[in-house]
Amino acid sequence: MQQNIEAIFLDLGNTLRILVKDQEHMARARRQITGLVGTDENPESFCEKLNERYKVYRKWAFENLQEAPEAEMWTRWLTPDFPAERITPLAGELTFQFRQSMGRRVVVEGGREVVAELQRRGYILGIISNLIGTREIPEWLEAEGFSKYFKSVVLSSVFGKRKPDPAIYLEAARLAGVDPSHCAYVGDNLKRDVTGTRQAGFGMLIIMIAPEELAQETLTDENRPDVIIHEFKQLLNIFPALENQTLKVI
């Protein structure tokens, strides 16, 4: 275990937050999307079409390790059959509603308490996440009272680069003012998260994965993390209070 970690960066999806399939929430978002676009097509069938087109976009994003600006994503991939001059000013809201159409995202059990305690123990905290959309996370951080905990937040939708490009990790470390070798990353993807953090020179990599999912994986020298956990609260067993540190009370 590394003893010189000063900053801990968290992934969002399947790490700090989980997706809940709230059907009413999803249906409301689908109706919002069709209303914004201006189509009479059934909201469910229209969003199924968007989901298929989104898969094509994601393939491009994965291959190029890039995240397209929202307007480009919608006018080039998701709704190329609608006038660009109509779609472009709506792209931010469309992305937000498209994300809501996938489900409702909630903080993982014990997430808030763990984040608060890690900060109290003296660690600089940050977020590094592949994500479409520029407004969802800033609004969520503010609404949930999480903004005070995270000094460095780097989203692929804002930065333009996606994990595992080491640039996104290095930017997060730079914003936190901490050398990468003194940074830890907590993610959920054995391939993407391991590769990026290793190339960026992060001092520790932790993967959170359910036992049944781990049983289906093959660990190699290329995808082996430093630590594997099954629950978010286990982070408190890994990171003790920093020495010579005045504990903060939130």
Image (cartoon, rainbow, N blue to C red):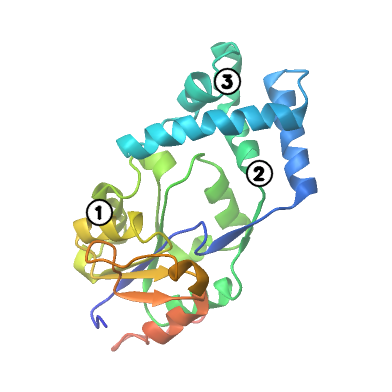
Q: Amino acid at mark 3?
A: Thr
Label 1 crowd (10 A; few <14 / some 14-19 / many >=20): many
Q: Position of residue 131 (x, y in %)?
A: 47, 45
Q: Position of residue 127 (x, y in %)?
A: 42, 58
Q: Tell me which corner region of the image, top left, top right, bottom left or bottom right, holds residue 106.
A: bottom right
Label 3 crowd (10 A; few <14 / some 14-19 / many >=20): some
Number of numbered tags placed on the structure image: 3
Relative placement, left or right, of 123 versus 101 is left
Q: Nearer the viewer, mark 3 or mark 1?
A: 3
Can residue 222 be seen by looking at this rendering?
A: yes
Q: Secondary structure at mark 2?
A: helix
> First in sequence: mark 3 or mark 2?
3
Q: Position of residue 160 (x, y in %)?
A: 35, 38
* Residue annotated with mark 2: 100
Q: Secondary structure at mark 1?
A: helix
> What residue is drawn where x is 44% and y is 69%?
214
Q: Amino acid at mark 1?
A: Leu
* Residue annotated with mark 1: 170
Relative placement, left or right, of 203 versus 9 is left
State whether residue 217 is above or below residue 199.
below
